[in-house]
Amino acid sequence: MLNNETTALQISRRAFLTASGALLVTVAAPLEWAEGQTTSATTRPPLKGDQLDSYITIDPDGTVVAYYGRIDGGQGLETAIAQMVAEEIDVPYERVRVVISGPQALDMGGASAGQGVSLSGMLLRRTAAEARRLLIEMAAAALAVPANQLTVTDGVVHSVSDTTKRISYADLIGGRYFGSKLNWNGRNGAATQVETPAPLKRPDQFKVIGKSIPRKDIPPKVFGQMEMVSDVRLPGMLHARMIRPTVAGAVPVTVDEASIAGIPGAKVVWIKNLLGVVAEKEWNAVKAARALKVTWSESRPNFPGNDRVHQYIRQAPVIKRGIQRENGNVDEGFKQAARIIEGEYEYPTQSHASTGPGCAVADVHADSATIWTSTQKPFGSAACVADLLGLPPEKVTAIWKFGTGSYGRNDQGDAAADAAVLSKHLGRPVRVQYMRYEGTGWDPKGTASVNRAKVGLDATGKVIAYEFISKAFSRQDTNPREGDAGDVLAGHLLGAPLHPNPIFEIPVASYTFDHGRLGWEIVPALMERASPLRTTHVRDPFGGPILFGSESFWDEVAAATSADPVDFRLRYLTNPRDRDAVRRAAEHYGWQMRPSPRNDQKDSDVAVGRGIAFRRHFDTFIALIAEVTVHRKTGKLDLLRYVCAHDCGMIVNPQTLKHVIDRQLVYGTSRAMFEEVRFDANMVTSVDWATYPVLHVADVPAQIDIVLIERPEAAPSGAAEMCLGLVPAAIGNAVFDATGVRLRRVPFTPERVKAALDRASV
Amino acid sequence: MAQELTLQVDGRARTIEIDDPAMPLLYALRDELGLINPRFGCGLGQCGACTVHVDGHSVRSCVTPVRSVEGKKITTLAGVGTPEKPHPIQKAWIEEQVNQCAYCINGWLMTAVELFDRNPHPTDAQISAAFAPLICRCGTHAAAVRAVKRAAQSV
C-alpha cells in the first residue's frame, strides 16, 4: 500500500492488482471519488444528525464503528446494535464495534421504553445500509466495475462475476470519513430520524439479525474485568459522601468541622444547603460522613406515611387532570347501562433500589467539565451539570460507563450533579458514592396511585361504557430526562428553579367499547424541594399501577358476567396481534375455558388458580398467565408457573430477548410481591434491604415459559419493560381464580393476602 | 498512624499502608489495590456485591476488617479464572448468559464457586440455600441456579 500522497495522487484513485496478485490501493486524499457522490475526509465532520459519519465510521483495519447514542442498562444492547449494523453493512458481526454514548456519539435519547432497538437500532441499521451503498459506489469507481455488478461479502466489495475484482472497506475508506449528508428530520434525541436511498435487507436475506449471538459484555463481567463507573479513578481524585438530614426538608444550620478533625484528610464542603465530606481515601470519607456533627433546621413534613398514602391521595385536591382518550359519550353510556360494576386498586410508592447506589466522577475546570456516569440519560445529565455549574452545554462532556441496572431515572444523575458541584468547589476530580440508605431513601421514586375503574353493561352483559381514572402524584415531579438543575437533589439544595411537570398519562388500551374514557388526576407533591419522595419514572412507569388496576378489573367484570377471562378479553380485542398474544399464551398454557373462580377448593387450605393479563405497549403485544398456589392459613403465595406470549415485531437476537423477558418477569415479580417504599411522618424509612424487601432466590417463579411470536416483517418495537407491568394483575387474577378473593393492593405480602382472605370469609 | 499491612490477594503478596485497622477489606481491595471487581452494594453485608473468598470461604468484604484477614488467602473474582482458563462456574455462567447489568455478580459467582469447589453436584435445596442471602435486582436468580447445574454436568 502506498503511503506517499504525491505518488498516490499521480497513480490515480484506483485500486490495482500488482504483478504478484497483491491488492494495491491508493488511500491518500481528502478528494472526491470520480464517480461517487461522497467526499472522503481525513477528519470526522462535526457531530450532527445530517452527517453519515455521526452514525457509522470505518476504522483503518476495516472495523465498522457504530455510534449508539443511548445506553445499555443490562439488556445486551451493544450486541443487538452490532448485529443490526453488521447485517446491513455486510461485515462479520465480530467486526462491528459499538460506541455507547459519550462525546463521539449523537444524543439518541438515552434509555427509554425499549427504544434501543426500535428507534436507535433502526436508525443505525438505515445508516449502515447507506454506508454500504456509498462504499459500493466508491468501489465501482476504484474497480471500474458498474455498481450494479458489485456485491459485498464480509466487508469486501467485489464483482459478482469476477471475484478477483475486489476491494475491502478498509482500503476504500478505513480511517477516513464519508463526509456524506443524510436526509435528516432536523430533530435530536429520541426523535432523530433519517431517510436514506439505500433499501434495508428483507428478512429472507438476514444472516446476522435473528441469530442468538452471545452477548459481548458478559465475559468481561464474569471475569471481573468490566470497568464500571464506580471503578473510574483519576489522578488527584477525592472521594466524597453526601450528608442528608434524618427529617425531610431540614437543612444544615451548624456544621462542626472539629468533629472530623481526627480523620486523615477529611474535609467538609458546605454550599448553601448542600453538605458533603471529602477525603483522599474512600474509607476516610465514609468515616467522616458518620462522624460529622450537624445541627439541622426544624422541619415538619407531616407526610401521610405509606400506610395512609392512598387515603391521602383519594382526599387530596386535584391540581391537574387529563383525558388520555375518550370515545362515544361515556356519561350517556353509563345512563343506558343495565348494570354498573366498579373497582378500585392501589399501587404503592416504589424505589429503583438499584444494587449499586448512585456513583459518579466529575472533573470540573474553569471553562469545561467532564462527568463519568452510568445514568440512562447521559446527555441529559451533561446538560444538567452545565445548568448547575453555569457552563455552556457544549462544554460539559458525559462519558457513559456500564454500571448498576437503573430501572428508570434512578439516582445516578443526582450523583453526577453532586460530584460536579464538589469538583468545581474543590478544583479537583471528585468521586461521589452514595451509601445504601440513599439508594432507597433519596432516589426519585415511582408514585403511589389509586386506580378507579367502572363499566356499564347492557342487559346481555356486553360492556357498553368504560371509565378508568388514575389519581396520583405526578409521574414527573423530577423530569426523567434530568437535563436541568431542578431535576437533581444538588439543584434543589442550591436553590435552582424547579420545573415539576404535573402529568401521569394512561397508556392507550387495545380494548374497544362504544363509550370509553381513560384519564388521570394529579395531586400536589408532599414536599416541593429536596423531597425524599420526589417522583419520576421507574421502569415501566405506565405499566404496573395502571395494568394492575385495569387488568384486574377486566377479570372482575369477566367473573361478574360468568365469562372466561381469556374469552372475555378476545370479545373486545380486534387487532390480530392483540388477539394472537392472548391466544398463544392460552394455548401454550393449556387454558381450559371456564369462568373464575374455580369454586372447587373451598374446603382446602391450599388453593391453586390461574390468571391472565394482557397489554399492548407501543407496538409490543404481551399476554402473561400466572399459576399460583394460595396458602389460606398464612396468605403465602407460591408462584408455580408463568407463560408469557411476547410479540415485539422483528427479533434481533432470540436468546437475548428471551433472557430480557425472563429476567424482567422476575424483576416484575419482586415489584408485585415485595416492593413498597415505607415512610413515616418525617422521612422515608426504607433505608436498606431489610426495610425495602425485594425478591430473593426462593421467591422466583418455579417455571417461566416464554413464547416468542415471530413477526420478521414487522418493525421491532422494544422489549425492555414491556412485560413486567403485567405481573401484579396476572398474580392477582390467579389468586381470585383460586379463592374468589380479589387483591386490591400491591405488594402481595402474606399479611396483606391473609387480610384479604379473612375479610372475605366474614 | 499509618501502618503497613500485607495481604495475599489472588496469589500475590500486596503491602498497603492503612491508617485504620478496622477499615473494611473492600476499601483496601478497591481503593488501595485498585481492584475493580468487588463492588460496594450496601456496606451492611446484606447483598453480596462485595464478596471475596478468604481461605476459600465467601465473606462480605464490606464488613470484614482488613486487619482480620492479614496473612490469609484472599481470592477475588479476577483470581478465580481467566478467559483462557475459566473456572467451570465461569464457563457455565457465560454459556447460560446469566447476567443483565452484573453489578451483583461477585456475590453470585463467588458463592457458586465456593459451593462447586466443595460439592460439584449440589441439590436444588443446596443451591437455593447458598444463594439465599444474595440480592440481584435484574432478576437473574433462576439463571444463576441453571448455571450451577450446567457446571455440574461438565464434571
Image (cartoon, helix red, strand yellow):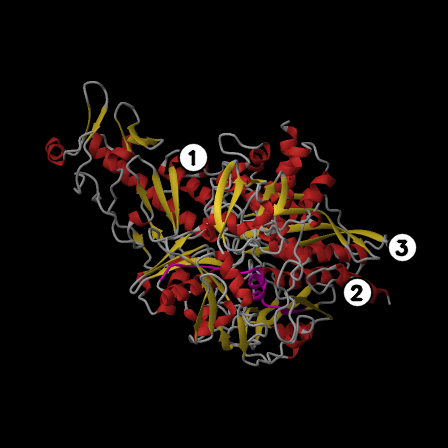
> What segment carries the magenta color?
A428-453
Tag 3 residue: A603
As displayed, is residue B48 above or below residue A746? above
Residue A215 percent location from the top left of the image: 49, 40
Residue at 26%, 40% in the rendered image? A175
Residue at 64%, 49% in the rendered image? B134
Tag 3: residue type?
Asp
Host chain of mark 1: A
**Nearest to viewer (mark 3 / mark 2):** 2
Residue A429 percent location from the top left of the image: 38, 59
As displayed, is residue A663 above or below residue A212? below
Query: How many C-alpha atoms fall within 10 Å of the one at disc 3: few (<14), some, or many (≥20)?
Result: few
Instruction: Judge whether residue A72 can be spotted in this image.
Output: no
As displayed, is residue A463 above or below residue B9? below
Residue A698 percent location from the top left of the image: 71, 48
Q: What separation in Å lies between label 3 and label 2 (alpha carbons)?
A: 18 Å
In the picture, the disc for residue A291 is none
Badge 3 or badge 2: first in the primary sequence? 3
